[in-house]
Image (cartoon, rainbow, N blue to C red):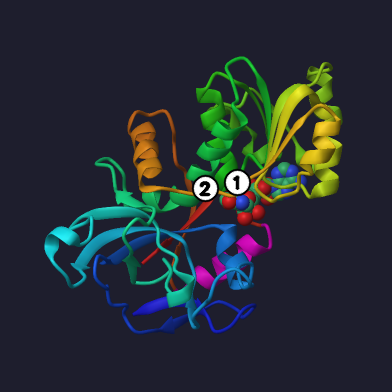
């Protein structure tokens, strides 16, 4: 099968011909139709998890994807997989120890993996854009306890996680301040942002304080390092919450300032994917695909994401 893989940690992603994976007992083989690109894909290829789990090489890249179940692994049907041939599924497909991922013509789903049936009205490219970014946004908003009437600053709002975060925060009735360069400002407003601050102009504190001299309640920050977090935390009122999926928060330091500091690691589940699909079906959440690439063009798209030049979600067609 054709797949985009790396031959070792840090290697340049390349299109390769690799053996089609075989589903074991309880597993299913999925013919992938679309895959979603996330920064975690190149971070893993660079060795982010090398001390935590085994990796098999060539390592097929890619976590998110959507496709059709093609075959079920051996074993009694009633003890077997949750899916049947022909089911349309979407979710997370990466398995480092077996060198398998979603940037391939075929992927494997193991029992309990964060894969669910695709909702009726969803198309493959949309479904592939959802799993990591939207579940992360959902879980982070939930963890902050963001409430109706509170003010939240979303840093990195124009990215994959950020765009869902803006919508989910607005859906809760919060007042949303989103970071965006001028070209993305209107889109952020359409997603529910009440105010825009332009990170291209430099200091965000000054821009936020102009309209919120008394401070804000929550910061959800997909971008800042520790120094950036320390600076932005000055925007929070006493009792405010700061959350970082980059682990840039020092919770003790926050506590000393009467703030709640949270570092976050996402865990997606099939149930959460189903809940998110319902929000999308109900029109409460939109998924926008900003860029589509063929599998042959995927290595270039991965390099663009690594260089920080992607806006919103990139989907790879298989
Ligand atoms: N811990 C976890 O479980 C977890 C889960 C998911 C994601 N993450 C991490 O969260 C980060 C965001 O993920 P993503 O998928 O949303 O990435 P993404 O789609 O690449 O988006 C990043 C966004 O940040 C914006 N940005 C860059 N510098 C900025 C700045 N100084 N201020 C404000 N915005 C800025 C970019 O816009 P411009 O190009 O216009 O600047 C871009 O739209 C990644 O590092 C990812 O690995 C962690």
Helix, strand or loop: magenta stretch: helix
Q: In whole angstroms, how far apart are the C-alphas of marks 1 and 2? A: 9 Å
Q: Which residue shows up at 84% across the image and 39% down it?
A: 253
Left or right: residue 127 compared with residue 179: left
Q: Are marks 1 and 2 in contact (CB under 8 Å)?
A: yes
Q: Position of residue 16 (x, y in %)?
A: 44, 83
Left or right: residue 315 compared with residue 107: right
Label placed on residue 297? none
Q: Position of residue 240 (x, y in %)?
A: 74, 25
Structural crowding at the residue carrying mark 1, measured as other residues with C-alpha within 10 Å and reported as few (<14), some (14–19) or many (≥20): many
Label 2, on which residue? 133
Image-quadrant location for residue 281: top left
Image-quadrant location for residue 89: bottom left
Structural crowding at the residue carrying mark 2, measured as other residues with C-alpha within 10 Å and reported as few (<14), some (14–19) or many (≥20): many
Q: Position of residue 235 (x, y in %)?
A: 81, 28
Is residue 304 on the magenta stretch? yes
N-term mark: 1 or 2: 2
Q: Secondary structure at mark 1?
A: loop
Left or right: residue 157 compared with residue 227: left
* Mark 1 CB lies closer than 8 A to ligand 1: yes
Image-quadrant location for residue 239: top right
Label 1, on which residue? 159
Q: Which residue shows up at 34% across the image and 34% down it?
A: 278
Q: Which residue shows up at 63% across the image and 39% down it?
A: 157
Is residue 180 on the magenta stretch? no
Specify start and end residues of the magenta stretch as a single range: 296-308
* Mark 2 CB lies closer than 8 A to ligand 1: yes
Residue 167 visible from this viewpoint: yes
Residue 99 visible from this viewpoint: no
Quadrant containing the C terminus in the rendered view: bottom left
């Amino acid at each position: 099968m054709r797949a985009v893989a790396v031959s070792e940690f840090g290697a340049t992603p390349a299109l390769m011909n690799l053996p089609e994976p075989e589903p074991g007992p309880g597993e299913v083989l999925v013919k992938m139709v679309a895959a979603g690109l996330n920064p975690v894909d190149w971070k893993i290829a660079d060795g982010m998890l090398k001390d935590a789990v085994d990796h098999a090489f060539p390592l097929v890249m890619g976590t998110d994807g959507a496709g059709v179940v093609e075959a079920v692994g051996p074993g009694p049907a009633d003890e077997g997989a949750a899916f049947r041939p022909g089911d349309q599924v979407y979710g997370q497909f990466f398995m480092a120890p077996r060198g398998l991922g979603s940037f391939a013509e075929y992927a494997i789903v193991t029992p309990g993996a964060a894969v669910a049936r695709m909702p009726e009205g969803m198309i493959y490219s949309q479904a592939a854009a959802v799993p990591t970014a939207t579940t992360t946004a959902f879980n982070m908003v939930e963890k902050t306890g963001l409430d109706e009437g509170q003010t939240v600053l979303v840093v990195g709002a124009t990215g994959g996680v950020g765009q869902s975060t803006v919508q989910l925060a607005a859906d809760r009735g919060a007042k949303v301040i989103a970071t965006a360069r001028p070209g993305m400002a209107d889109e952020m407003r359409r997603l529910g942002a009440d105010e825009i601050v332009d990170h291209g102009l430099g200091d965000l504190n000054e821009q936020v304080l102009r309209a919120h001299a008394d401070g804000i309640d929550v910061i959800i920050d997909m971008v800042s390092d520790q120094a950036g977090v320390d600076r932005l935390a000055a925007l929070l009122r006493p009792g405010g919450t700061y959350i970082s999926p980059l682990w840039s928060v020092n919770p003790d330091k926050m506590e000393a300032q009467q703030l709640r500091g949270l570092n976050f690691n996402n865990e997606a589940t099939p149930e959460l994917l189903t809940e998110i699909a319902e929000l999308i079906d109900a029109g409460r959440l939109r998924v926008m695909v900003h860029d589509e690439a063929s599998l042959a063009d995927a290595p270039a798209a991965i390099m663009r994401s690594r260089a920080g030049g992607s806006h919103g979600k990139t989907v790879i067609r298989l």
